Amino acid sequence: MKKWVKGLKENDMFAWGDLVVIGLLVILSFLPLFVFAQQQQAKVDVTSSSSKEVKIMAVVSHDGETIKEFNLTDHEGTTTWTYRDDDGHYNKIEVKGKKIHIVEANCADQVCVRQGYRSKVGQSIVCLPHKLLIEIKSSDGKNVDGGLVN
């Protein structure tokens, strides 16, 4: 005879084994959360110190041509720089601490402004209407944040 959960009748078809299986499934459903949390902690952030003197740079390019570089590793305070092209397009770029973002632009969609701050190697900010790209790169050419993209 099966042991039934207290409060359940025999015809409810719910036994202790069912509770064990449900409990295990709930516990296993949280396993990816812990795995990804561990991977996230292992990633190297721009704000952490590195023993290798690797510089993190924000490279601003227009139509594939580099026009400005910002050293994010040693940057302190706030620096604002405005890119203007011959057609009257502009993007106001702000480097604050060790992160960069586009504060203001006169493009129609404003996607570049809404992308927010970037600080990790491999991240980028793109303004398609103005053909402007800001890429975060490391001086050794490696993807320091531990991601798959090099």
Image (spheres, grey):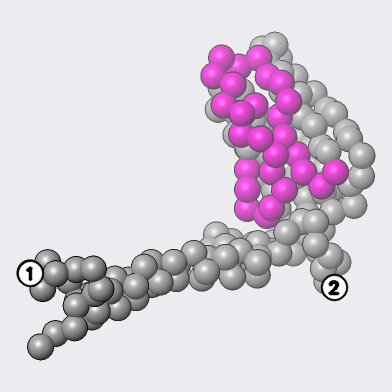
Residue displayed at 75% across by 39% down: 100
Crowding at mark 1 (Cα within 10 Å: few <14, some 14-19, many 20+): few
Residue 89 lies, with reference to residue 139, above or below; the image says above
For the residue pair 82 and 109, the one nearer the viewer reads as 109
Residue 93 coordinates in the image, percent (x, y): 76, 29
Asked whether residue 66 appears in the rendered view, the answer is no
Crowding at mark 2 (Cα within 10 Å: few <14, some 14-19, many 20+): few
* Magenta stretch encompasses residue 111: yes
- Start and end of the magenta stretch? 97-124
Q: Amino acid at mark 2?
A: Ser
Asked whether residue 104 appears in the rendered view, the answer is yes
Q: Amino acid at mark 1?
A: Asn
Locate residue 61: give its quadrant. top right
* Magenta stretch encompasses residue 76: no
The circle on residue 51 is 2
Label 1 vs 2, first from the N-terminus? 1
Residue displayed at 25% across by 73% down: 6
Per the image, label 2 sits on a secondary structure element best described as loop
Query: Hey, which residue is sitting farthest left in the picture?
Result: 11
User: Residue under circle 1?
Assistant: 11
Per the image, label 1 sits on a secondary structure element best described as helix
Q: In the picture provided, is 37 more to the left or to the right than 42? A: left
The circle on residue 69 is none
Locate residue 114: give its quadrant. top right
Q: In the picture provided, is 109 more to the left or to the right than 133? A: left
